[in-house]
Image (cartoon, grey):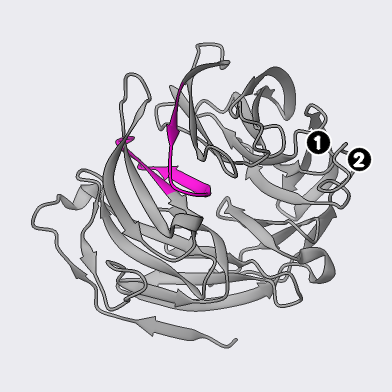
Amino acid sequence: MKKWFLSLLAVVSVSCAQKSDLLTLFAGTYTDGFYVYSFDQASGKVVSTGPYEEAPGAYLKAGMPNPSFLCREGQMIYAVSEKSDSTASLYSWKMSGDSLQLVSSAPTGGPLGGAPCHVTTDGRFVSVANYSGGALAFYRILPDGGTSHPDTLIVSGTGGPDQRRQNKPHVHCSVFSPDGKYLFFSEFSSDEIGMADVTPMGLRSYRRAASADPDTGCRHLVFDPSGTRLYLIGELSGAVTVYDYADGKLTRKQVIKADPGEARGGADIHLSPDGKFLYASIRLKNDGIAIFKVEADGTLTGAGYQNTGIHPRHFNITPNGKYLLAACRDSNEIQVYLRNPKTGLLTDTGKRILLGKPVCVCW
């Protein structure tokens, strides 16, 4: 198997940061690669340096087209190349010290695998959501950390009321259930959540798990820390749908607006590490992040709204819960916000990671 190798000595300033506070930050982009930084989650600053004029502070770059979404499992980083043609691929990179090695690349499903926009893994398998192709691609992880070609392709449904945006199948996100038995995925055009059993042999028994309101445009999903609730952000509705979860079954509990401006641009969704607050990003109008308090029964109460830069397609919260980093694609920067752990509200620190077309942040 052909392998590429990138190596560069990182110059990291650790004198003002404890090693336990340093995160390896990976930033996906709509450019020609993703970048690696050392981020101090105590101070909210990048503390690494490197040679990339287009990405000040990055000490490594992995060259690949449109790495729009990344996930990490140990030393492995799985990244999708969001291309709308047959070159759309899943790349498997290995992080070793101050180097990145490309272990494998695999197609995301041919005609059904166009525009892969999300990737996740449970350490055994990798799941990729293909937006324009409309199919979920499922891969087995090989002993070297690379992946097979997709073992399974599940074509999404249609039937939503928006004849312009829901007229073709689209898959936008997938998540493994906390018990590892199931894979759930958002079906944008049918306003449904699909699911399949995860077995040692791969996916089995695809079926519909739950419905959302018509014109939701199901986008991203997240389980709460207890593993008893699933939250969905609708791209078209700009609403968060809350489901109770138990033994592979989802029961819809609440629908609450995150976007009162009807932007039809709901994007990402995350919970704080302690599970007490939920955040959802909105694009296209009044760009920002809606903030909700999570009540004892898992339902949500609005807590506030933080305006951000242009097009916050993705964001993430540091493991210590102190900062929220928003990838603002059209502002060409990742913005750093301080979280209030009692109110959930965000304060703009003014700190920025300058980068062309950032669209994903992961640790």
Identify which residue, 302 or 26, lies in the foreground.
302
Q: Amino acid at mark 2?
A: Gly
Q: Quadrant of residue 180?
A: top right
Where residue 146 is drawn, which disc sits there? none
Residue 1 in picture, x, y percent from top left: 60, 86
> Is 238 placed left or right of 351 in the picture?
right
Where residue 159 is drawn, which disc sits there? 2
Determine the residue positioned at 32% across, 63% down: 37
> Is 73 placed left or right of 115 in the picture?
left
Determine the residue positioned at 32% across, 76% down: 52
144 over 282 or under it: above or below: below
* Cα separation between marks 2 and 1: 8 Å
Using the rendered image of the protein, determine whether residue 359 is visible from the camera's viewpoint.
no
Determine the residue positioned at 59% across, 53% down: 120
Q: Earlier in the sequence, mark 2 or mark 1?
A: 2
Q: Where does label 1 land, which residue?
A: 191
Q: Quadrant of residue 210?
A: top right
> Is 167 placed left or right of 13 in the picture?
right
Identify which residue, 138 or 173, lies in the foreground.
173
Using the rendered image of the protein, determine whether residue 309 is visible from the camera's viewpoint.
yes
> Is 260 placed left or right of 110 in the picture?
left
Residue 38 in picture, x, y percent from top left: 27, 60
Q: Which residues are magenta?
A: 304-326
235 over 58 or under it: above or below: above
